[in-house]
Image (tube, rainbow, N blue to C red):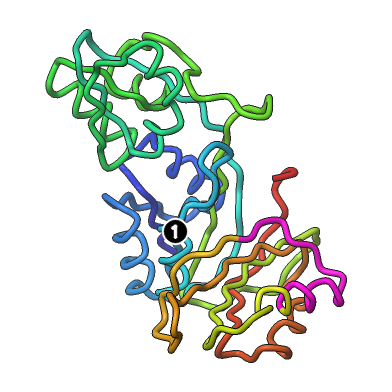
Amino acid sequence: MKVFYLGPPKTFSERAAEILSRDVRIPEPNFQRVALQTAQTPGAGGVLPYYNLLEGLIQESLDLIYEYKFTIHNACRVPVELCIGGFEGKTIHSHTKALAQCSDYLGENFPEAALLPEASTADAARLVRAAGRGMAIASRAALAEQGLDVLEADIGNRRHGRRNFTDFLLVSADPAPPAGEGPFRTMVAITPPTDRVGLLAEILSVIRENHLNIAKIHSRPAIDLVEMAIEPQMFYLEIMSDRKDIQALTDAFGENTVRILGSFPALGNS
């Protein structure tokens, strides 16, 4: 099986791909390409980040899973230690998420620097090395790969007294195999076809009546075309249960409204 991930080598996505699969791992330049290759390659898998401790749910990944009708097969948690390395200069390169996760450090130490977004943290290190100027925020491994000295380590923002991490999902266009031992969490997308008073309360009521617990809930403008007088919304719910226990939601609101994206092992206490 081929597994696609955000490259080049030494990204956090590559580390997740190593954890989630021993098959052939292929780097891609962005998440859209990861999804496209996964959809077009028979039997392939794709690795997408979906939650970061500092930045929360990663909208692009969830939307790609929904739009390509992928099924979630597995998940893993990757510790994120971001370092700054390279040369003296007034430009700092990194992925947009990494720049955001280091905003406190950058504001205190480089308030005048130009922050330049790149396709990945590893790409940032490669570009800085090629240019011979500027700095990159990346993992130790990505900086070492390019022969760049670490100027300062572990520069990410700190929240809740916990070290930063990103949770990744392994997805595929193929159905997921039977689940193993739990505990599990299940990702659900709910797109109400109409708006009415108390709609979200009804959804939460079905969840409570069936003794389900929500780990995360996220609303966003609806992807599907739905007829509403106001701006159409949809909800992503991460529920602390296996997908077989989520059937009550489908029974209550219908398969056109509720889509079960897949189940995965519970990761830590996020």
Within the magenta stretch, is there residue 259? no
Q: Quadrant of residue 19?
A: top right
Comparing 171 with 2, the one in front is 171
Report if residue 210 lies within the magenta region. Answer: yes
| Number of marks | 1
Judged from the image, the secondary structure of the residue bearing numbered disc 1 is: helix
- Above/below status of 217 relative to 140: below
Q: Residue at x 35, y 24 (%)?
A: 137
Compared with residue 33, is residue 103 higher up or lower down, i.e. above or below? above
Please state which of residues 199 and 66 is positioned toward the viewer in this rendering: 199
Which quarter of the figure has residue 262? bottom right
- Residue 220 percent coordinates (x, y): 48, 65
> Who's the residue at 42% across and 10% down the image?
152
Give the residue at x 34% y 34%. 121
Say which residue label 1 marks.
Answer: 61
Nearer to me, 218 or 24: 218
- In percent of width and height, residue 187 lies at 62, 67
Which residue is rendered at x = 73% and y = 90% of the image?
A: 251
Eyeballing the image, is 57 above or below 32? above
Residue 67 appears in which quarter of the rendering? Answer: bottom left
From the top left corner, tell me how far across and down residue 119 is, in percent: 27, 42
Q: Amino acid at mark 1?
A: Ser
Q: Nearer the viewer, residue 232 or 171?
A: 232
Question: Which range of residues does the magenta coloring cover?
Answer: 203-217
- Residue 198 position in % (x across, y down): 68, 78
In this image, 149 relative to 105: left or right? left
Circle 1 residues within 10 Å: few <14, some 14–19, many ≥20: many
Q: Quarter of the image containing the N terminus?
A: bottom left
Please identify the quadrant where the C terminus is shown.
Answer: top right
Task: Kindly give the residue lying farthest to the left in the view shown.
Answer: 131
